[in-house]
Image (cartoon, grey):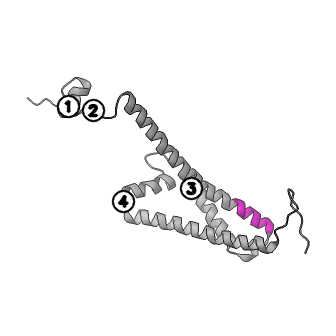
Amino acid sequence: MHRRSSLFTRFDAGSEAIQKLAVIVTYAMAINVFFVGVEVFTALYSDIPHHVHHFQYLFVGLDGYSALAPWMWVGQALAVGCIVLLLQPRMRRRESVLAALCVGVIAAIWIEKGLTMVVAGFIIVATLIILKIVDLTMGLRVSQEGEVQGLDLSEHGEEGYIFS
């Protein structure tokens, strides 16, 4: 069987190698989606707020912030859709379909890992930088004397809750 050569190179990996890689990608994506499901189940089942809030923020939004939620759903739907199609050998054998599925797999992983981990990491780093700048310029905590004296008097120069 004569195959059409690539646009960029004359190297032909062969259909057997391509099909083996397709099977490997199929299993890897299935394991990836399984572990995401396990992570979501564990977080929701444990009901520990800081575990639950992470997934609430990513999948439905938290405190009015939901910009990542549609992307997470698209990424998960794309991952599941690609797995369903990759699990069917007749779909994997068609190279045009396989190429589209590979693009879908890459997009799903990029959305899941890229948007969630990189954005969350950026938010954490940016927050720490802002907190350090505030701490260096005006401080994040009051002095111990101000805390004992009361914040109304030490920070605002007025007395609050006078009951006499």
Alpha carbon separation for disc pair 3 and 4: 21 Å
Residue 66 showing in the rendered view: no
Residue located beneath label 2 in the image: 142
Disc nearer the start of the sequence (2/4): 4
Q: Secondary structure at mark 2?
A: loop
- Picture residue at 47% right of the left edge, 63% below the top: 40
Q: Amino acid at mark 1?
A: Glu
Alpha carbon separation for disc pair 1 and 3: 48 Å
Q: Secondary structure at mark 4?
A: loop
Residue 117 showing in the rendered view: yes
Horizontal relation, residue 80 to residue 51: left or right: right
In percent of width and height, residue 83 lies at 65, 69
- Picture residue at 37% right of the left edge, 33% below the top: 135
Q: Nearer the viewer, mark 3 or mark 4?
A: 4
**Location of residue 146 (image quadrant):** top left
Q: Which secondary structure type mostly characterizes the magenta part of the structure?
A: helix
Alpha carbon separation for disc pair 4 and 1: 36 Å
* 75, 31: nearer the viewer: 31
**Location of residue 89 (image quadrant):** bottom right
Residue located beneath label 4 in the image: 48
Q: Secondary structure at mark 1?
A: helix
Q: Which residues are magenta?
A: 95-103
